Image (cartoon, grey):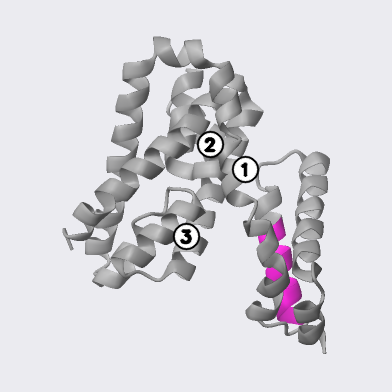
Amino acid sequence: MINDFFKEAFFGGAALSLIAYELGLILKRRFRSAIFNPILIAVICVIAVLTILDIDYDSYNESAKYISYLLTPATVCLALPLYEELELLKKNLSAVVCGIVAGVIAGMGGVLVLSQTFRLDHIQYVTLLPKSVTTAIGMGISEELGGVATITVAVIIITGIFGNIFADLIFSACKVKEPVAKGIALGTCSHAIGTARAMEMGEAEGAMSSLAIAVAGILTAAGAPMFAGFM
């Protein structure tokens, strides 16, 4: 009966997702801790509701998929803060380019090393390869290389949440204080979810992270087939 409701309710799944995310925002404002990440809280709440009420994923996704349609235009809108910080980009162009390229190579190289270490097969390897790019690009890369796109999505989300939560701690431990460096690191490694954290840090961080998402996505799409042949 509940499954039928989610199939027939036009925005049932979307409403559940938005309510869960709003709960995450309330907890974040209340406790002011990185652990209470709104996306993480939303994921946990949605999984809990689906499990407790025995709602299958297809029924939930049937009415929640409309949120996904906003992913691409939302990513495009990230060009606005970059435009506002265009002069900063011009002054640090070489460092920005080198940083993004290094981040993309390090990301895919890290997947290669860990896959060999844990003896993953080729399908598992290419499934994890696009972990650091935005979902829209990562799914396409995974499918093209023969990976499992649904697992790729989960890995991308986990990667983004990890970057969002632990960014401050990592920057502090590594003594990274330059706003441009912080933005490039978050955008290259943690895509849109990391960019959300970068925007909270400042305009420069948000602008550089927005640029890194797009460039890292293009570089990953171009380089992933080559890396896929290494294993």
Residue to which mark 3 is pinned? 155
Res 71 visible: yes
Horizontally, is 211 left or right of 93 in the view?
Answer: right
What residue do we see at 31% from left, 18% from top?
94
* Disc 3 secondary structure class: helix
Q: Amino acid at mark 2?
A: Ala
Magenta residues (range): 42-52
Query: Which callout, 3 or 2, points to the residue nearer the camera?
Result: 3
Residue to which mark 2 is pinned? 167
Q: CA distance from mark 2 to mark 1?
A: 22 Å
Residue 169: % across, % down: 54, 35
The crowd level at tag 2 (other Cα within 10 Å; few <14, some 14-19, many 20+) is many
Res 173 visible: no
> Are circles 3 and 2 on residues that touch, CB within 8 Å?
no
* Disc 2 secondary structure class: helix
Residue to which mark 1 is pinned? 74
What residue do we see at 82% from left, 75% from top?
9
Horizontally, is 98 left or right of 159 in the view?
Answer: left
Q: Amino acid at mark 3?
A: Val
